Amino acid sequence: MPIAGCVEAQPEEMAFRPEYRGVETRLLDGDLVNFFVEMTGARSGEDVADYAECAAAQYTLIRGYGFARHLRTNVDEQGGLWRADAVYTISPALPRGSRTIDAEVVAAHCAENGIPMV
């Protein structure tokens, strides 16, 4: 018979403690850029894809542009090491397409969330 007022202990949720292991950037052609990122402690592929997007946003700003368009991101995980291989185009004006980012807005979001950039 349970005792009134007692609460069964729940297992503690694992804290999100990412370790960002760096960004490699390759300019493929003019405005086409490839980003390779690695991290551990990701909760899912979305965390490593966000890391790549943060790198793309900062790189866009460094190059003096304001916008980027996401083309693709491939994510892989092996033994707790997450990798993303992402390709973006960068541009001074808002590009056509539905997968565009405003680099300043994304970079601010990344800084607020402690996600490092280039």
Image (cartoon, helix red, strand yellow):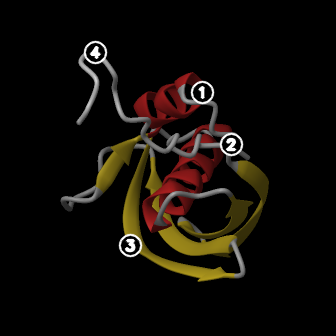
Q: Are marks 4 and 1 in contact (CB under 8 Å)?
A: no
Q: Name the residue at 61% across, 80% down.
A: 77
- Does residue 106 appear to the left or right of 62 in the view shown? left
Instruction: Tell me whether the residue at label 1 lies in contact with that at label 2, contact meaning CB atoms closer than 8 angstroms.
Output: yes
User: What is the x, y in percent for residue 45?
Assistant: 47, 67
The secondary structure type at the circle numbered 3 is: strand
Q: CA distance from mark 3 to mark 2?
A: 19 Å
N-terminal-most mark, 4 or 2: 4
Amino acid type shown at disc 1: Ala
How far apart are labels 4 and 1 at the CA level?
43 Å
Q: How busy is the neighbourhood of tag 1: few (under 14 within 10 Å), some, or many (20 plus)?
A: few
Residue farthest top in this picture: 5
Mark 4 belongs to which amino acid?
Answer: Gly
The reply to whether callout 4 and callout 2 are in contact (CB within 8 Å) is no
Instruction: Give the SS element for disc 4.
Output: loop
Q: Which residue is mark 2?
A: 117
Q: Quadrant of the N terminus?
A: top left
